[in-house]
Image: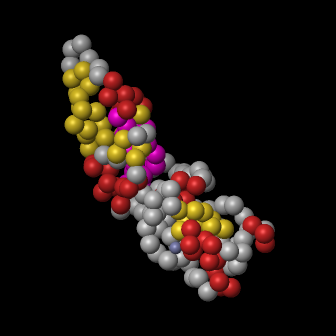
Amino acid sequence: MSPTIFSVRALLLNSSYEPMRVVSWQKALVLWFQGKVEILEYHSVFARSVSSSFKLPSVLRLKSYVRTRNKTHIRFCRENVYIRDNYTCQYCGDRFTTKTLTLDHVVPVSREGKKDWGNVVSACRSCNQKKANKTPTEARMPLLKEPRMPNWLPLTDFEVGGQEVPLSWRQYLRSSQAY
Ligand SMILES: [Zn+2]
């Protein structure tokens, strides 16, 4: 098998088509051999063994619904906040790059504002400075939307493991952007 195959992953959907997580191609094949999933899309990459060659799955759907107790925990970190906010300043609405964005505490840290999904948003430098140690109301800078933990990060605009998200994933991710 060529080395590129090792970086090929599959998007795993619940039986309800809700994206659950990204799995390695090995895990994808195990799930398929176990009869737990149906394959909805394939990568254009072939895997070859001695006797046969087969296409690697790109999108899988579980045959039976799995209840996710923790509602797919999404790690709170700078980059994930930017992704949730679509690299958009939550005050002026302009888009920025990772380098030019900052994190803003809606309720300032000095007033015991928490560092979590519900209190941290993406903001450009100038909005962040303008808002300073005020709440959005005091600063008269209303938020574009109320921040909360996303159900699933919209992967359409970024890369997974240094690779662009496969085209075949996009329709499934787009339809489920609850945030
Ligand atoms: Zn701004």
Q: Residue furthest top?
A: 50
Residue at 28% across / 33% down in the picture?
56
Q: Quadrant of residue 123?
A: bottom right
Residue at 68% across / 74% down in the picture?
132
Q: Main secondary structure of the magenta part?
A: strand
Q: Position of residue 116 (x, y in %)?
A: 66, 61
For the image, the number of numbered tags is 0
Which is nearer the eye, 121 or 7? 121
Residue at 25% across / 40% down in the picture?
42
Residue at 56% across / 52% down in the picture?
74
Task: Inspect this view and state whether residue 13 appears.
Answer: yes
Question: Is 141 placed above or below 123 here?
Answer: below
Question: Is 55 placed above or below 52 here?
Answer: below
Query: Colour mode?
Result: secondary structure
Please give the range of residues in magenta.
Answer: 8-23
Horizontal side, residue 79 vs residue 53: left or right: right
Horizontal side, residue 89 vs residue 24: left or right: right
Q: Position of residue 29 (x, y in %)?
A: 36, 30
Q: Quadrant where the N terminus lies?
A: top left
Q: Position of residue 130 (x, y in %)?
A: 62, 77
Task: Inspect this view and state whether residue 62 appears.
Answer: no
Q: Position of residue 129 (x, y in %)?
A: 63, 73
Horizontal side, residue 142 vs residue 135: left or right: left
Magenta includes 96?
no
Question: Is 171 placed above or below 129 here?
Answer: above
Question: Is 96 placed above or below 44 here?
Answer: below
Q: Quadrant of residue 50?
A: top left
